[in-house]
Image (cartoon, helix red, strand yellow):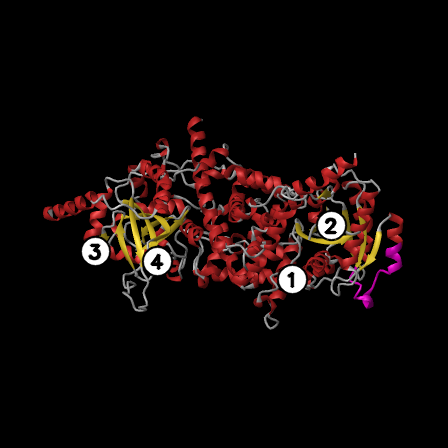
């Protein structure tokens, strides 16, 4: 599948909120309950269709524990999208969102698209954070909001694609400086052996137009 | 004797005058010309009379198939051996004829000898193997010749054939040389430490370990058998030490268990929020550690509960660094091997004395390791370094887990024991000692043997004797024989007769030694030049892990180098590549390579240190 852009995403949030499971559900369409805890950063990618364009999502899944935070911060920069995840069955993970937002604001590029994800919505009987609270927090901080379940795959696809769509919109609006390497967006160049053909086809048209 | 010689010479002249029969196959001639330059080059560099270098090309129905180059210990050569070797290498079933390049058919030892005589005048001995079809399943069975040689495959289809070492027999020069180049140092002990051997290392009267250094050396080189692993690991971590008799060990176990249970109960009885939070955190990670291993999933054994207890006790008594993710990965293999809860706890504490800086919040030790890895790969393989830099925007972030967990998650669980014991044996024993000797509280908390049992002779006499590659690593006689052939090792002879203490002067605690052993003379490789200065003690203890990481990169070199650089989108390639390869790397190969680099590095550092001392 061909694609026009490469977007870099970063997944952040407290320990045990299901960051790696969201990634695994998105890239491999499966759920693994006993997933090794993430050390440092792990990597995944998938090509999706957004606004009739192919986009390759390059996703950096980070460790949630505080000890790893200082190294992870240095990788906020250079990401176009961030998935900020909390666990709807654990109030503390929601309470820490302000800290995460501040971190993002301090260490990322200013145009980063942030999606707030309330994960584990399949466990609604153990819910500690109401959907409305999440929505309100997202509204206050200018984030996209969605509740997901990495276990049942509910809204997982949506969370990643909504972010991509928002980035695409911002590109169209000219918000991003695509020449800047740190914006987290790259234009996908066709393989060099494809390039001459397309040029040969398009050049005569242009000259005849003049 | 003389008639025999004469006969050989006549056969030799027969071979050399038989020049008219050219080679039929153009392809073969061309390729042989091409490789000849290289072969000459090698030939010129190795003037060793007891090695024969020859090329064997395989032909089927007179059509060239493939060729291999061999460097063979002369004493192996016989007709029977050649047939066996050819069967083995080309996967044949004795359905072939061996010829010289002049189509002289070699049918017996006499012909082989003739070829070797001939060889002294030629740069290389070329043999042709004509394979013919056979329907006969029971063709000549050559397997009765016992498999008395080792094959070492090196680049470009070249193979070194050496005589398998038989214990208590002097190794041949070629064997020794290849050992230095390609792995095992002392092949008299080519296999892992067996139970029998280990018992010979203990004092028969009281069970004391006679030579701790020798044990560490042996483990570094080949690891140990599963049946003795738990005791060996206790020695590696210095939970058992050289001074302890069987009685001491028994006493230690009793007292350590008492002490441990007391410590465990102290947090088990508390129900404060802080402790509950910690419990939840550790419980979650314990259940997902090595979850694919049956041993940890089996509900009837309480291994998970024990793992949990060990970690809880450690974190309660070591608020700095406290619990950090990844610790479960480190304690799981120890638990799998040792099983006894208090003993596992003591070993884990010892391990953490070496590893805890890595888990520290400030990230200093991790950054040092990341830096060292970058530096080292740059020194060893500049081309690969450039490629990685080009393709990886994360600045080696993909190696973070490798460096934090000493590659624990990169190899299959069954292989991690060998990897870890090699690494731990490579470290100086004071890595497992407490930094602050005055702090007797910490001593007791860690179940350190010196604090648990107090016997008048129990002192830490050996804490400064040190790690691998001390004098015993050098098989006797190697030094002499190598120095006779200075061209084989390309070694700077200025170092040859140098005397030095063993590795432990590298810990910057140099003290004068009475009996100075001779350091092994290893041909040093060029990349070491890039390490001009001696590393500090911390960096020094990081190096085996660093070389293990370099080995992982080198194992994947071709996949990394194959990446196209036209696309900007593959800057996650390396990271994703290695994420996929988690627990799938070849441990044996990686270890071999890491040991090779490490050995080189150690000798180099000794020499640098030595030079500095001379200059002072």
Mark 3 is surrounded, within 10 Å at the Cα level, by few (under 14), some (14 to 19) or many (20 or more) other residues, namely: few
The answer to whether tags 2 and 4 share a subunit is no
Magenta-colored stretch includes residue B431: no
In this picture, which residue range is highlighted in magenta?
A: A119-135
**Placement of the C terminus of chain B among the 4 image quadrants:** top left
In front here: B34 or B287?
A: B34
The answer to whether tags 2 and 3 share a subunit is no
Q: Nearer the viewer, mark 2 or mark 4?
A: 2
Q: Which residue is mark 4?
A: B88
User: Residue B108 shows which numbered tag?
Assistant: 3
The answer to whether tags 3 and 4 share a subunit is yes
Give the mark, 1 or 4, whose residue is nearer the N terminus.
4
Cα separation between marks 1 and 4? 45 Å
Cα separation between marks 3 and 4? 19 Å
State if disc 3 and disc 1 touch (CB < 8 Å): no
Mark 2 is surrounded, within 10 Å at the Cα level, by few (under 14), some (14 to 19) or many (20 or more) other residues, namely: many
Image-quadrant location for residue B87: bottom left
């Amino acid at each position: 599948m061909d694609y026009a852009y490469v977007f870099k995403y970063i997944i952040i949030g407290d320990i045990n909120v299901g960051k790696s499971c969201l990634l695994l559900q998105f890239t491999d369409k499966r759920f693994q309950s006993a997933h090794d805890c993430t050390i440092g950063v792990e990597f995944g990618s998938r090509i999706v269709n957004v606004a009739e364009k192919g986009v390759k999502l390059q996703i950096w899944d980070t460790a949630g524990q505080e000890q790893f935070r200082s190294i992870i911060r240095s990788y906020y920069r250079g990401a176009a999208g961030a998935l900020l995840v909390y666990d709807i069955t654990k109030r503390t993970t929601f309470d820490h969102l302000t800290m995460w937002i501040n971190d993002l604001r301090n260490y990322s590029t200013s145009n980063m698209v942030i999606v707030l994800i309330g994960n584990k919505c399949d466990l609604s009987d153990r819910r500690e954070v109401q959907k409305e609270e999440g929505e309100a927090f997202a509204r206050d901080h200018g984030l996209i909001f969605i509740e997901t379940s990495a276990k049942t795959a509910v809204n997982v696809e949506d969370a990643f694609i909504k972010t991509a769509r928002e980035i695409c919109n911002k590109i169209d609006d000219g918000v991003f400086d695509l020449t800047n390497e740190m914006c987290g967006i790259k234009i996908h160049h066709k393989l060099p052996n494809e390039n001459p053909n397309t040029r040969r086809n398009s050049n005569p048209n242009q000259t005849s137009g003049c | 004797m003389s008639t025999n010689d004469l006969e050989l010479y006549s056969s030799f002249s027969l071979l050399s005058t038989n020049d008219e029969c050219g080679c039929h196959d153009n392809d073969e001639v061309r390729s042989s010309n091409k490789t000849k330059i290289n072969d000459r080059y090698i030939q010129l560099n190795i003037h060793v009379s007891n090695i024969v270098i020859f090329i064997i090309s395989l032909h089927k129905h007179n059509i060239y198939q493939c060729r291999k180059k061999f460097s063979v210990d002369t004493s192996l050569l016989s007709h029977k051996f050649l047939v066996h070797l050819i069967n083995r290498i080309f996967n044949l079933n004795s359905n072939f004829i061996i010829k010289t390049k002049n189509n002289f058919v070699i049918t017996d030892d006499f012909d082989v000898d003739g070829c070797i005589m001939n060889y002294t005048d030629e740069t290389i001995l070329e043999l042709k193997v004509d394979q013919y079809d056979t329907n006969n399943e029971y063709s000549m069975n050559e397997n009765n010749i016992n498999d008395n040689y080792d094959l070492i495959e090196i680049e470009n289809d070249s193979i070194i054939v050496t005589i398998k070492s038989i214990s208590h027999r002097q190794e041949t020069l070629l064997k020794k040389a290849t050992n230095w180049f390609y792995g095992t140092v002392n092949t008299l002990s080519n296999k892992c430490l067996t139970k029998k051997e280990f018992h010979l290392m203990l004092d028969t009267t009281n069970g004391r370990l006679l030579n701790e250094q020798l044990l560490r050396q042996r483990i570094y080189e080949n690891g140990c058998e599963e049946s003795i692993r738990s005791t060996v690991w206790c020695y590696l971590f210095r939970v058992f030490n050289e001074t302890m008799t069987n009685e001491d060990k028994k006493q230690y176990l009793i007292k350590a268990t008492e002490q441990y249970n007391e410590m465990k109960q102290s947090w088990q009885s508390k129900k404060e929020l802080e402790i509950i939070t910690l419990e939840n955190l550790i419980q979650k990670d314990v259940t997902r550690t090595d979850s694919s291993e049956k041993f940890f999933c089996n509900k009837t054994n309480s291994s998970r509960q024990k793992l949990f207890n060990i970690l809880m006790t450690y974190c309660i008594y070591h608020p700095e660094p406290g619990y950090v993710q990844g610790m479960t990965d480190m304690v799981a293999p120890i638990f799998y091997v040792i099983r006894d809860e208090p003993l596992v706890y003591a070993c884990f504490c010892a391990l953490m004395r070496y590893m805890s800086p890595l888990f520290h919040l400030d990230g200093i030790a991790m950054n040092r390791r990341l830096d060292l890895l970058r530096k080292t790969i740059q020194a060893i393989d500049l081309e690969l370094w450039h490629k990685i830099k080009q393709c990886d925007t994360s600045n080696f972030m993909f190696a973070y887990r490798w460096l934090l967990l000493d590659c624990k998650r990169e190899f299959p669980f069954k292989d991690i024991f060998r990897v870890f014991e090699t690494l731990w044996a490579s470290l100086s024993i004071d890595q497992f000692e407490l930094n602050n000797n005055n702090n007797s509280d910490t001593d007791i908390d860690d179940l350190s043997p010196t604090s648990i049992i107090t016997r008048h002779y129990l002192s830490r006499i050996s804490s400064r004797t040190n790690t691998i590659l001390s004098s015993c690593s050098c098989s006797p006689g190697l030094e002499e024989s190598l120095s006779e052939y200075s061209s084989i090792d390309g070694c700077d002879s200025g170092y040859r007769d140098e005397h030095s203490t063993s590795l432990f002067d590298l810990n910057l605690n140099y003290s004068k030694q009475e009996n100075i052993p001779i350091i092994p003379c290893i041909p040093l490789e060029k990349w070491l030049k890039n390490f001009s200065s001696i590393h500090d003690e911390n960096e020094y203890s990081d190096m085996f892990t660093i070389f293990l990481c370099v080995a992982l990169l080198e194992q994947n070199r071709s996949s990394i180098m194959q990446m196209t650089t036209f696309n900007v989108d593959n800057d996650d390639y390396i990271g994703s590549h290695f994420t996929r390869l988690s627990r799938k790397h070849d441990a044996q190969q990686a270890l071999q390579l890491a040991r090779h680099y490490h050995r080189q590095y150690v000798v180099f550092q000794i020499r640098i240190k030595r030079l500095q001392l001379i200059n002072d």
